[in-house]
Amino acid sequence: MVKSNLPVGGENLTYYNVIDCINESNNEAAKTLQNVDFDTINGSAATYITTNIIRPLKYFEERRGERRTAEELKIAFQGFKILVSHINESCVYTPTLNTFCMYICCSTKTFRSMTYEESERGEIANEIKECIEESLLQNMLAGKTHPITSMFVAKANLGLRDNDNNNVNILNINGNSRSVDDILAEFNKNKVEN
């Protein structure tokens, strides 16, 4: 259950606060998940999930074009993480930044521009982006995703690219390149510490 101190307001709206919308959406998703056998799905489970389970929040659909506040982003991401944990009880699923942006009815381009803002909203947007990217990378390194799919997702979402020497590097937000060996060493170090 997600909690917040956001004010309620607005006219002609179905949802007056994001919390009620998230809780209702997550409850609907949990019911849907109970009736899904991922072993019998034709095609990709990830496609099924993003089409049928992770849906745009009506709270944000009703407010298309409005600026997302730092508090709304923080609460939406908490709800999103709860939803993803419910999904992962049924199958292995790793969300992307695109999926989160769809969830909050925001283009990926707009969300990425938020990460450059020097404000609380910018800090929260950057934390969300980094958390999703880290989750993608950890699941790839842990072998929870198909290797070919992992390479495609990494190139599309993490800036991974092959250089001329066929060594794989990952570009971070500052444009600095990190080798997979460096990332694996850091991952193993963090794994041992935890």
Image (cartoon, rainbow, N blue to C red):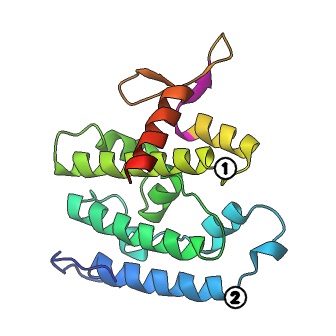
Kind of element beneath mark 1:
loop
Q: Which residue is tagged 1?
A: 143
| Residue 191 highlighted magenta (yes or no) | no
Q: Is residue 50 above or below residue 53?
A: above
Q: Give residue 37's quadrant in the image.
A: bottom right
Position in image of residue 70 (x %, y %): 22, 58
The amino acid sitting under disc 1 is Gly
Instruction: Report the residue at 42% width, 40% height from top.
Output: 189
Position in image of residue 3 (x %, y %): 25, 80
Position in image of residue 194 (x %, y %): 38, 54
Looking at the image, tell me whether mark 1 or mark 2 is earlier in sequence order.
Answer: 2
The answer to whether residue 63 is visible is no
Name the one closer to the observer, 59 or 138.
138
Q: Nearer the viewer, mark 1 or mark 2?
A: 1
The amino acid sitting under disc 2 is Asn
Instruction: Report the residue at 46% width, 64% height from top.
Output: 103
Instruction: Report the residue at 35% width, 68% height from top.
Output: 78
Q: Is residue 26 above or below residue 66?
A: below
Name the one closer to the observer, 112 or 31.
31
The answer to whether residue 165 is visible is yes
Give the CA separation, mark 1 to mark 2. Answer: 27 Å
Q: Give residue 71's quadrant in the image.
A: bottom left
Kind of element beneath mark 2:
loop
Q: Which residue is tagged 2?
A: 35
Structural crowding at the residue carrying mark 2, measured as other residues with C-alpha within 10 Å and reported as few (<14), some (14–19) or many (≥20): few
Tag on residue 155? none
Contact? badges 1 and 2 (CB < 8 Å): no
Which residue range is magenta in the image? 157-162
